[in-house]
Image: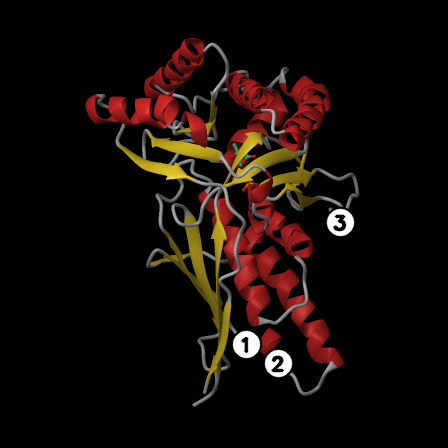
Amino acid sequence: MSEIHRASTTAPVNIAVIKYWGKRDPKLNLPTNSSLSVTLSQADLRTHTTASCSPSYPAEDSLLLNGSPQDVSGARTQACFRELRALRKQLEDGNNALPKLSTFPLRIVSENNFPTAAGLASSAAGFAALVRAIANLYELPSSPTDLSRIARQGSGSACRSLFGGYVGWEQGSAADGSDSMAFQVAPAEHWPNMRAVILVVSAAKKGVSSTTGMQTTVATSSLFAARASETVPRRMQEMQKAIQDKDFETFAKVTMMDSNSFHATCLDTYPPIFYLNDVSKAAIKIVESINEAAGKIIAAYTFDAGPNAVVYYLEENEKEVAGLFKSILGEKEGWAGQRGQAVPINDEARDKVVVDA
Ligand code: DP6
């Protein structure tokens, strides 16, 4: 029996507070603006991925997600496989003793512990885990920064899931994408009392995919140019300073304004894209009333490409924010479920590399 090499890892979900929306190069997945996110707890939201390879496997690479076979022939997945294989081949060329893993078919098995494609950034954790699992399998000496450049090509937001805490994605300017990668703004311990409550308004697959939606926005929205060239660069600075200073009011205000700007740009797309529904809008109203009652900003909503709300708050305001949402959740129709609170933490490596004989 021929050998099977195997490695596993987990990757966390991240939720952007400054949104990535627009590609300047769809092939290399290069963005039109930088973005910034908070990495959530893997206890609540994560992808677990095992990558294995063997000369005994059927010739085609394969990917199983939550038990269902996925198409791996798409350019995004292929780009990740190709780049990782090329890095492995470099190691093999320099050391004859290494097994020629780069020539073996790959088998990837992934499991999410949250609804896939519900606007909960499943592609972010998914591609981050896929890239890291294969990098572990190939025993590549790559840093999270190196891996973020590869994961970006699978799904843009995935580059930010290679880091824990508060994470930026520098858009870069190089034509080959070599400077478009993620970086850590601050580790989770810097501002450890940050919390997020996720309101799963709908766990159904989202209507317009991010990829299609952002392409149409770039092509048709007149609001888009100002967002990419002026609004986001300014907010990236404000947001990084707010995080450094642990200034929740500014963090929250910029988060909400950027979510609003992103969804306004979606509405300004032709034909228009509606990700928010009436329940999403009710969540915005509730956050507004929480902040009004507190006399200061203690809660911030944000929405990705779907109706689910993520509300950031500080632990000391648990009762006023998460407590209120929980009490409403029980009664109100439309709140299909809730994941409770997720704590931003570092992506603790849970890597395992094994070889079965
Ligand atoms: C609204 O990373 O899913 O969540 O690069 O086409 O795979 P692709 O897009 P994706 O887009 C995420 C968009 C967003 C904002 C964000 O996470 O920054």
Q: Residue flagged by tag 1: what amino acid is it?
A: Phe
Quick check: can you spot residue 204? no
Measuring from the top left, give residue 174's x and y in whole percent.
79, 43
Circles 1 and 3 in contact, beta carbons < 8 Å: no
SS class, disc 2 = loop
Q: Residue flagged by tag 3: what amino acid is it?
A: Ser
Residue at x-position 69% and y-position 17%: 226
Does residue 81 appear to the left or right of 142 in the view shown? left
Residue at x-position 23% and y-position 21%: 332
Measuring from the top left, give residue 350's x and y in whole percent.
49, 62
| Above or below 349: residue 1 | below
Residue at the extreme front: 316
The residue at label 3 has a CB less than 8 Å from ligand 1: no
Measuring from the top left, give residue 57's x and y in whole percent.
45, 77
Q: Where residue 199 is drawn, which disc sits there?
A: none
Q: Which residue is mark 1?
A: 104
User: Which dot, 1 or 3, sits closer to the camera?
Assistant: 3
Q: Which residue is mark 2?
A: 100
